[in-house]
Image (cartoon, grey):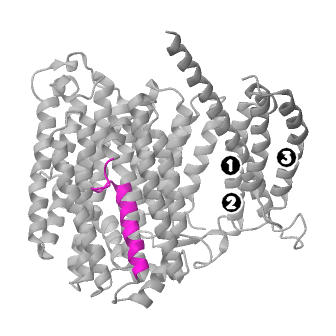
C-alpha cells in the first residue's frame, strides 16, 4: 500500500469531519486542520527521494482504472502545497478569530487542499478536471468569505471566469478523449506520440491544446486571462490570499499546464504543432511579465500590488517552461531544455515561498493597523520589527537581489532564454525584473522605512502565532537561494527530469 | 413563509411518501438498473423541497431539521471515504473487498450498494440545504427591500 491516496483522503476526511464536530466543539476546525495539514506536510517532505510510484484505485490497472501517480514533479508540488497550507493554517489560528463561521472556513480550506493535492497526484484527465473543480469551488467561496460587498463581487467575478476556464478544460478533455479514446494521461500520451510523433497534429488535438492553454492559463492568471486575480486575491482573508497566490494558481494552472503539455501532448522534435504550442506559451508568459509588472507599479493597495506582482512572476515560471518546450520542439539540446525547465520550476517553488510570505505579512500589517492602503502607513519598521523584517526579506527575494532565492531562479530563466536564441524575450524579462525591484522598493519606502505616521503610530507587533509562520517562510526564502546544492538535487532535479522524460512517465503508469 | 393553498398542501401530503419510496428504490437498485445514489438522492431531496414549497420552511424543517441535514450531508461523504478505506485492507483504495454475491440480486456487487446509499445521503441532504438556503436568503432580501421602501 503506497501513501499516494492519503494526500487526497486526509484533507477530504478532515473537510467533512470539521462541520459535524463543529456543531458541538467550536475549535474542531482549528484542531483538525492544523493536525491534518501538519501530517500532510510531513508526509510530503518524507516523500523526497522515494522512487516514483503509481496507485491503481480499486485495483484496476492503468488504462482501465484511475491511476494516482507520484513522480518528481508531483513531489515538488506536494511539498509546496502542503507546507504552505500548514503555515497558512497556523497563521489563520489567530488571524481568523475576527471572522465568524470558522468551522466552515477550515472545512473549505481543507477541501481546497484536497482538490489541489488531487490535481497533482491524478494520472487521469477527467479526474484532474474533477479535482480542479473541487479546489476552484472551494476557493470561490473562500474569496467571498468576508461577505462584504466588494468581497462578494470579487468572489462572483472569480466564479464566473473560473467556470469559463473549467468549461474550456472540460471541452479539451472531451476532445482528447474523442481523438485518442482514453482519459488516462499516459495512455493518451502514448496514443498521441505513436500517431502524430514528429508530424503535424490532428486539428482537433490542436484545438484541445488551445483550450487547455486558455483554461489553465485562466487558472494561472496569465495575461490576457488575468482579470479576476487582482480582485480575488486582495479580497480574500490574508491566509487565503497566500494560498491563492502561493499555491492555487500554480497547482491548478502551471502544474496542470505543464503536465498536460509536456506529458500528454509532448514536445516531439521537429513537430510544427509542438512549436506552435511552445510559441503560445512563451507569448502568454511575456505578456504576463510585462502587464503584471507595469500594472503593479501604480497600485497603492498593498495586497492589490502583490496580486499584480503574482501575474508577472507567474509569467517568469511559464516562460522557463515555454522556452524549455520550444527548445525540445525545435530539436535543440536536451541539456538546454533541462536548464530552462529547471529555472521555471525553481521560480515556481521560490514564488510560492516569498509570495505567501508577502501576503501573510500584509495580513499581519492589516491585523495590526486595520488598513492595507500604503498611503496611510509609514515607518512600520519601528513599530513591527519582525513583520517588517520578513516583508523586507521577501521583497528583496522576489525582486531578484542576490543572494536571495529569486535572483537565482530569474538568472537561470534568463540565461536559458538567451542560450535558446531569444535575446529580445530575455531583454524584456531583464527589464521587467528591474520594474519588479522598483515597485518593491516603493513598498519598502512607503510602509517600512520613513517616519512613523498615520495608522502605524498605534500599531503593535503581532502575536507569535502570526509571526512564527512568517519567520519560517523567511528562512525558506534565504535557504532556497544559499543552500541550493543541499536541496536542489533532491527536490528540483527529479522534478525537472520528470517533466523532461515523458516516455518515462508513460512507462511508469502503464508498466 | 405560510405555504400554498389547501389543494397543493393536500396533494403534497399524498405524494411525498411515494416520492421518497421511489427515490429509495432508485438508490437501492442503482447497481442493477439505471439509477443510483445521485439520482435517487435528488429524488428524495425533491420530496423535502416539495414539502418546503407547499407548507413553508418551518414544516419542512420539522420533518428534516437543518442540523440533521447538515449531519447527513457530512456523514454521507465520510461514509463514502470510510468505505474507500475498507478497500485498503485488500491493498488498494476503493478495492471491492465485500462479497460480490449472486449477480442481479439486491445484495450483490459488493461495496457499490453501500456507496450508493452514502451518496444518496450526501446528495439528498445537500440539495435540500441548498434549496433551503436559497429560500431563506430570498425571504431575507425581500424583507430588506420592503424596509428600504418604508424608510
Residue wearing tag 1: B78
Separation of marks 3 and 1 at Cα, in angstroms: 26 Å
Q: Position of residue A363 (x, y in %)?
A: 32, 32
The residue at which mark 3 appears reads as: B19
Q: Secondary structure at mark 1?
A: helix
**Badge 2 is on which residue?**
B84
Q: Nearer the viewer, residue A221 or A59?
A: A221
Q: Is residue A215 magenta?
A: yes
Task: Tell me the chain of label 3.
Answer: B
Quadrant occupied by the N terminus of chain A: bottom right
Tag nearer the camera, 3 or 1? 3
* Residue A464 part of the magenta segment: no
State the residue in front, A145 or A366.
A145
Query: How many residues crowd around disc 3 within 10 Å: few (fewer than 14), some, or many (20 or more)?
Result: many
Give how far across and how far down residue B96 sits, in percent: 74, 68
Q: Sequence order check: which comes first, mark 3 or mark 1?
A: 3
Left or right: A396 in relation to A185:
left
The reply to whether label 1 and label 2 mark residues of one chain is yes
- Label 2: how many Cα within 10 Å (few below 14, some 14–19, many 20+): many
Q: Give the overall secondary structure of the magenta segment.
A: helix
Q: Chain of mark 1?
A: B
Amino acid at each position: 500500500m503506497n501513501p499516494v491516496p492519503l494526500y487526497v483522503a486526509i484533507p477530504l476526511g478532515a473537510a467533512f469531519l470539521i462541520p459535524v464536530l463543529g456543531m458541538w466543539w467550536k475549535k474542531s476546525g482549528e484542531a483538525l486542520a492544523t493536525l491534518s495539514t501538519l501530517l500532510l506536510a510531513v508526509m510530503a517532505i518524507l516523500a523526497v527521494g522515494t522512487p516514483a510510484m503509481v496507485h491503481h484505485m480499486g485495483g484496476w490497472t492503468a488504462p482501465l482504472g484511475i491511476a494516482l501517480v507520484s513522480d518528481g514533479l508531483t513531489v515538488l508540488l506536494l511539498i509546496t502545497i502542503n507546507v504552505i497550507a500548514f503555515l497558512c493554517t497556523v497563521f489563520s489560528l489567530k488571524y481568523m478569530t475576527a471572522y465568524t463561521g470558522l468551522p466552515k472556513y477550515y472545512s473549505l480550506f481543507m477541501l481546497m487542499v484536497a482538490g489541489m493535492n488531487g490535481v497533482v497526484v491524478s494520472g487521469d484527465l477527467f479526474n484532474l478536471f474533477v479535482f480542479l473543480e473541487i479546489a476552484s469551488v472551494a476557493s470561490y467561496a473562500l474569496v467571498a468569505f468576508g461577505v462584504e460587498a466588494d468581497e462578494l463581487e470579487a468572489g462572483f467575478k472569480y466564479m464566473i471566469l473560473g467556470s469559463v476556464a473549467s468549461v474550456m478544460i472540460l471541452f479539451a478533455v472531451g476532445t482528447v478523449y474523442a481523438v485518442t479514446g482514453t482519459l488516462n494521461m499516459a495512455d493518451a500520451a502514448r496514443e498521441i506520440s505513436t500517431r502524430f510523433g514528429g508530424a503535424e497534429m490532428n486539428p482537433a488535438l490542436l484545438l484541445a491544446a488551445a483550450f487547455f492553454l486558455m483554461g489553465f492559463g485562466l487558472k494561472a492568471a496569465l495575461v490576457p486571462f488575468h482579470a479576476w486575480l487582482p480582485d480575488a486575491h486582495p479580497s480574500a482573508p490574508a491566509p487565503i490570499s497566500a494560498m491563492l497566490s502561493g499555491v492555487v494558481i500554480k497547482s491548478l494552472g502551471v502544474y496542470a499546464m505543464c503536465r498536460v503539455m509536456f506529458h500528454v501532448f509532448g514536445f516531439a522534435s521537429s513537430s510544427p504543432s509542438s512549436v506552435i504550442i511552445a510559441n503560445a506559451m512563451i507569448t502568454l508568459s511575456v505578456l504576463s511579465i510585462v502587464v503584471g509588472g507595469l500594472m503593479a507599479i501604480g497600485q497603492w493597495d498593498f495586497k492589490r500590488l502583490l496580486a499584480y506582482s503574482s501575474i508577472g512572476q507567474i509569467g517568469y515560471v511559464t516562460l522557463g517552461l515555454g522556452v524549455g518546450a520550444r527548445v525540445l520542439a525545435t530539436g535543440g539540446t536536451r541539456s538546454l531544455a533541462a536548464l530552462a525547465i529547471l529555472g521555471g520550476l525553481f521560480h515556481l517553488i521560490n514564488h510560492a515561498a516569498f509570495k505567501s510570505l508577502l501576503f501573510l505579512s500584509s495580513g499581519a500589517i492589516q491585523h495590526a493597523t486595520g488598513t492595507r492602503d500604503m498611503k496611510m502607513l509609514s515607518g512600520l519598521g519601528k513599530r513591527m520589527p519582525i513583520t517588517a523584517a520578513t516583508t523586507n526579506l521577501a521583497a528583496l527575494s522576489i525582486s531578484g537581489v542576490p543572494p536571495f532565492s529569486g535572483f537565482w531562479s530569474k538568472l537561470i530563466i534568463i540565461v536559458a532564454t538567451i542560450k535558446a536564441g531569444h535575446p529580445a524575450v530575455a531583454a524584456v524579462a531583464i527589464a521587467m525584473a528591474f520594474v519588479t525591484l522598483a515597485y518593491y522598493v516603493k513598498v519598502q519606502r512607503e510602509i517600512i522605512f520613513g517616519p512613523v505616521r498615520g495608522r502605524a503610530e498605534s500599531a503593535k507587533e503581532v502575536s507569535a502565532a502570526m509571526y512564527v509562520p512568517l519567520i519560517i517562510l523567511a528562512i525558506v526564502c534565504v535557504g532556497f537561494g544559499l543552500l541550493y546544492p543541499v536541496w536542489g538535487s533532491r527536490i528540483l532535479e527529479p522534478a525537472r527530469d520528470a517533466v523532461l522524460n515523458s516516455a518515462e512517465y508513460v512507462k511508469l503508469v502503464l508498466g | 413563509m405560510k405555504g400554498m393553498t389547501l389543494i397543493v398542501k393536500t396533494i403534497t401530503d399524498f405524494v411525498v411518501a411515494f416520492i421518497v419510496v421511489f427515490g429509495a428504490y432508485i438508490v437501492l437498485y442503482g447497481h442493477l438498473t439505471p439509477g443510483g445514489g445521485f439520482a435517487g438522492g435528488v429524488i428524495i431531496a425533491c420530496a423535502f423541497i416539495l414539502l418546503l414549497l407547499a407548507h413553508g420552511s418551518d414544516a419542512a424543517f420539522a420533518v428534516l431539521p437543518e442540523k440533521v441535514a447538515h449531519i447527513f450531508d457530512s456523514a454521507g461523504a465520510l461514509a463514502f471515504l470510510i468505505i474507500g478505506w475498507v478497500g485498503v485492507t485488500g491493498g488498494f483504495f476503493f478495492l471491492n473487498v465485500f462479497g460480490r454475491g449472486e449477480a442481479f440480486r439486491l445484495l450483490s456487487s459488493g461495496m457499490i450498494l453501500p456507496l450508493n446509499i452514502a451518496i444518496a445521503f450526501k446528495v439528498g441532504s445537500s440539495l435540500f440545504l441548498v434549496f433551503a438556503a436559497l429560500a431563506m436568503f430570498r425571504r431575507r432580501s425581500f424583507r430588506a427591500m420592503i424596509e428600504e421602501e418604508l424608510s
